[in-house]
Image (spheres, helix red, strand yellow):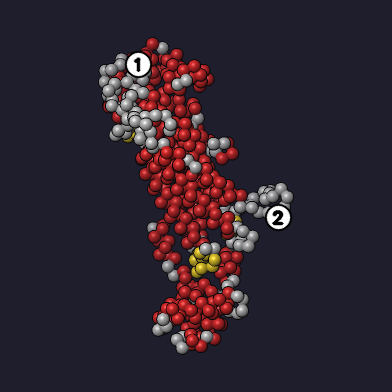
Amino acid sequence: MIPRYSRPAMTAIWDPAMRFQIWLEIEAHACDAQAELGVIPKDAAKAIWERGQFEIARIDEIEAETKHDVIAFLTNVAEYVGDEARYLHQGMTSSDVLDTCLSVQLSRATDILLADFDALLDALKRRAMEHKYTLTIGRSHAIHAEPTTFGVKLAGHYAAFARNRKRLEAARAEIATCAISGAVGTFANIDPRVEAHVADKMGLTPEPVSTQVIPRDRHAMFFAVLGVIASSIENLAVEVRHLQRSEMREAEEYFSPGQKGSSAMPHKRNPVLSENLTGLARMVRSAVMPAMENVTLWHERDISHSSVERMIGPDATVTLDFALVRLTGMIDKLVVYPDAMKGHLDSLGGLHNSQRVLLALTQKGMSREDAYKVVQDNAMNAWRGNGAFVAFLKDDSEIANFMTHEEIESLFDIDYHTKHVDTIFTRVFR
């Protein structure tokens, strides 16, 4: 998590001051519930809200001696609250505070990510509609296949990110649980109603069984979803990188006035944004495996997960937030070259119609095996640059037994390949 790839709203969630503020709110809400249950005086609960404060430097100073961050925090708060502070943390354990806080932070981080998704989906939809019928060659194995449209390409990415948004919503629900259940999660020293109250106030739901910690399969699922989102980002970024290659130049990142592409070569216009997104996606995915390994803890709890989450929580969410916003800007300003797309589409002289010719011959009575061979022979002749595909087909005596020249010509109509674009767009955008 470095400033270069961070946005203030997301980093603020992980700031130490925010973390300690959430801790204080958790403790204060727990005191309110305890007071309502008659466990502590109501004046004590009121004092926590009125005088509860903390100082980060002082917490660090105390922790240097105690070697325990929650005790250091409680000690510092007690210095502000006074005698009533003895009612803080009644029946609670450190993980009640730590895990509930992490749930709050991840939930708030997810809310920002969901807003990022909305902006990205809007940009993808707008550009897909703009290029709904912009013809381009589809490629499989990076080799010319059959025609598609650039809008259909973008619609596919829109659909992927729409799925990812639903996954993220589910991940938010998965992670938004609260544990205020005591030392080994049995509520022996604290009433379950305290947990329910804190959960309600913090926008969470009670964890059904929390041992001493919230089960880490929830966190594993959350970070796995972030990893899938990162892969979808890279998938689109790599597509842009390929389309911007000098040999292609079908689309390219916006190159702003005054921008420089190379310190040595003034002509360079490099796909730096999409390359950067590839790198950022790798970093987000790097959080997935540690999150999976965190699921396995000793008995009711150990802290092998703790150091991992202190890093991957901020790093993965901050990085993904930045990546989504960067991708949105890249798509929003992406420069598209329809003429170059059409030029590449036409560059092999209609070879992209080979399947249509194959199917037409089978419909006319030729066996599929014979049709495949005769079409491939003529296609390879055209591939080697010896002439036009359609001309070779017309001159083939074997094909002449099944189709006229006019019928062959009719198989090269480009509109044939785009007749169901509306159907695709209806399915995607409804």
User: In the rendered view, does 85 fall on the left or right side of 282?
Assistant: left
Q: Please indicate, yes or no, whether residue 112 appears anywhere in the rendered image.
A: no
Mark 2 sits on what residue? 267
User: In the rendered view, does 104 fall on the left or right side of 143?
Assistant: left
Q: Is residue 351 above or below residue 325?
A: below
Q: Residue furthest front?
A: 298
Query: Measured from the top left, where is residue 72 in percent x and y?
Result: 45, 19
What is the spatial separation of the Cα atoms under label 2 and label 1, in whole angstroms? Answer: 69 Å
Count of numbered tags? 2
Q: Is residue 366 above or below residue 1?
A: below
What residue do we see at 45% from left, 81% from top? 370
What residue do we see at 43% from left, 19% from top? 71
User: In the rendered view, does 325 fall on the left or right side of 366?
Assistant: right
Mark 1 sits on what residue? 87
Query: Measured from the top left, where is residue 40 in percent x and y?
Result: 30, 16
**Residue toward you, 171 or 343:** 171
Q: Is residue 375 above or below residue 14?
A: below
User: Which quadrant: the N terminus?
Assistant: top right
- Mark 2 crowd level (few <14, some 14–19, many ≥20, 10 Å Cα): few
Question: Disc 1 marks which amino acid?
Answer: Tyr
